[in-house]
């Protein structure tokens, strides 16, 4: 990179001042429009990452801007000592569009899962036997970085050096029906599961697995809690990914990421069984239900929960999958392509394992931003609103990057 640029100087400052827990790619993003973003040097990129599946309606969606602007000149913050209209209306709309009866708002995915974990323990303390306090989660899953949610995340690499971790979590193999039956025993009070494991490598629950968990939970009185922080809000072509499993009703669902379309917001939605558990004073968040975030989230929900939009997501997801399959038929760089809607993962073939960082860099040089998931999976989670010309442009650039990668990595 040219060392005299503003980007270079900013990046050097960032590297000196941020705690070193991130390693951003060497560009400074300045603005976005639709499914494109531009860096400070004016270079354009097709955004197949959407800020890790957050910018559901792309960048600068006019309805989100209007919703934010309308709220900006009213009130920004009140705390939960007072009611505000955006939070009330958003909660009511989430209740109307899901199995839930009540909603708790917070600011991130980890906080939503933290709330779910606390709710499960309170539920157990009121309704279950004293030995029934274990929360079952799945190998390869991801639930956040707070101490409780990182413990729920059954991946040792996230735990290392943070011990002692909170107790009361039990890990089970994902998609293993028999193991789940054994794990959800008389000591389990809840199960926390992603319908499609996102960070873990875009690994969908097998058909019937969530229903099986529902039955195991019912046998012992445990809560079924679905983490839809990444898979929810239309990402898979249904409003919530668990809806692909017909007739399934969870007890709790957590949302964040796409819910705010770029505004920080998380939510825990609770069905009838546990709706009354979080009693006065038992949990809270100063910023939770922030009117700016809720006003924008209402617009996101309205736009995503539209049959045409959900159809668009399924259609564009299919186009992207077909394009990946056709590129792969020629180059053979992937061993599997999986996922649903616009939540797709392409696992690199064995010869390319360990090389994904290079691929991400080639993609960026070609003008397309993609993400990593798991160790060797390319994750594609573009804005749900991506149009056909943006999609085609992104695919062409990805194709170019993969060609260079295949030749240079051999
Ligand atoms: C399924 C899932 N749960 C929880 C989280 C944590 O969300 P946040 O980073 O907003 O705390 C993530 C983030 O990647 C996620 O994908």
Image: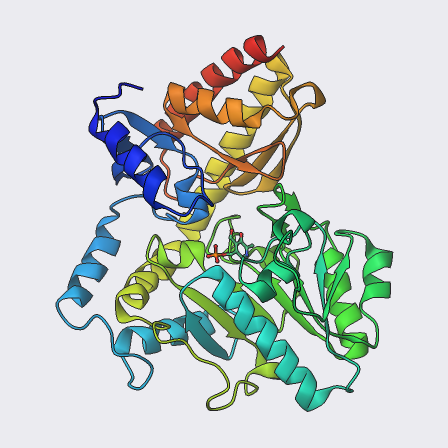
Q: Nearer the viewer, residue 396 or 388?
A: 396
> Which residue is located at x 55 percent, y 66 percent?
113
| 235 is higher (above) or lower (below) than 105 | above
Q: Kindly identify the residue that appears in the image at 43 percent across and 64 percent down.
A: 266
| Residue 300 at x, y percent in the picture | 35, 57
Q: Quadrant of the C terminus?
A: top right
Q: Nearer the viewer, residue 78 or 231?
A: 78
Residue at the farthest left position: 73
Q: In the displayed image of the protein, which residue is found farthest to the front?
A: 16
**Residue 160 percent across, percent down from the top left:** 64, 51
Q: Looking at the rendering, which quadrant does residue 105 occupy?
A: bottom left
Asked if residue 383 can be seen in this view, the reply is no
Q: Is residue 99 depicted above or below 383 in this figure? A: below
Instruction: From this view, report whether residue 202 is shown above or below residue 141.
Output: above
Q: Taking 358 as reference, is 314 above or below it?
A: below
User: Seen in the image, is 94 located left or right of residue 115?
Assistant: left
Colour scheme of the rendered structure = rainbow
**Quadrant hosting residue 242:** bottom right
Residues 35 and 313: in front is 35
Q: Estimate the x, y position of residue 347 in percent, counting from the top left.
A: 64, 30
Q: Is residue 43 left or right of residue 369?
A: left
Residue 139 in the image, given as x and y percentages of width and height: 72, 52
Q: Residue at x 34, y 52 (%)?
A: 262
Give the number of marks.
0
Residue 101 visible in this rendered orientation of the protein: yes
Q: Nearer the viewer, residue 241 or 193?
A: 193
- Which residue is at a point 43% across and 79% down the rendered structure image? 284
Q: Quadrant of the N terminus?
A: top left
């Amino acid at each position: 990179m040219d060392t005299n640029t503003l980007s270079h100087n900013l990046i050097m400052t960032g590297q000196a001042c941020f705690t070193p827990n991130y390693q951003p790619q060497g560009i400074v993003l300045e603005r976005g429009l639709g499914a494109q973003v531009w860096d400070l040097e004016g270079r354009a990129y097709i955004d197949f990452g959407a800020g890790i599946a957050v910018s559901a309606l792309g960048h600068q969606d006019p309805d989100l801007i209007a919703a934010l602007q309308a709220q900006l000149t009213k009130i920004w913050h009140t705390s939960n000592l007072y009611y505000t209209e955006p939070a009330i209306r958003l909660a009511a709309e989430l209740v109307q569009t899901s199995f839930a009866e009540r909603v708790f708002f917070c600011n991130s995915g980890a906080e939503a899962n933290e709330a779910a974990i606390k709710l499960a323990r309170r539920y157990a303390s009121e309704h279950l036997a004293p030995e029934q306090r274990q929360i079952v989660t799945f190998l390869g899953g991801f639930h956040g970085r707070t101490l409780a949610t990182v413990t729920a995340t059954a991946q040792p690499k996230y735990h290392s050096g943070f011990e002692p971790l909170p107790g009361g979590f039990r890990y089970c193999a994902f998609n293993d029906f028999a193991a789940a039956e054994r794990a959800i025993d008389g000591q389990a009070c809840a199960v926390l599961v992603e319908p499609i494991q996102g960070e873990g490598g875009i690994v969908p629950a097998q058909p019937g697995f969530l229903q099986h968990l529902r039955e195991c939970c019912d046998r012992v009185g445990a809560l079924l809690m679905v983490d839809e922080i990444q898979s929810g809000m239309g990402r898979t072509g249904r409003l919530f990914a668990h809806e692909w499993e017909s007739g399934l009703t969870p007890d709790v669902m957590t949302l964040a990421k796409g819910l705010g379309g770029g505004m920080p917001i998380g939510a825990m939605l609770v069905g009838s069984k546990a709706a009354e558990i979080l009693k006065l004073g038992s949990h809270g968040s100063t910023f939770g239900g922030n009117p700016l975030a809720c006003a924008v989230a209402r617009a996101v929900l309205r736009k995503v929960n539209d049959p045409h939009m959900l159809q668009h997501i399924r259609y564009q997801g299919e186009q992207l999958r077909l394009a990946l399959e056709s590129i792969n038929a020629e180059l053979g760089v992937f061993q599997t392509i999986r996922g649903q809607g616009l939540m797709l993962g392409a696992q690199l073939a064995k010869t390319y394992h360990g090389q994904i960082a290079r691929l991400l860099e080639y993609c960026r040089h070609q003008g397309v931003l993609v993400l990593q998931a798991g160790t060797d999976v390319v994750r594609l989670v573009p804005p749900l609103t991506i149009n056909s010309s943006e999609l085609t442009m992104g695919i062409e650039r990805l194709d170019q990057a993969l060609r260079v990668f295949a030749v240079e990595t051999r």
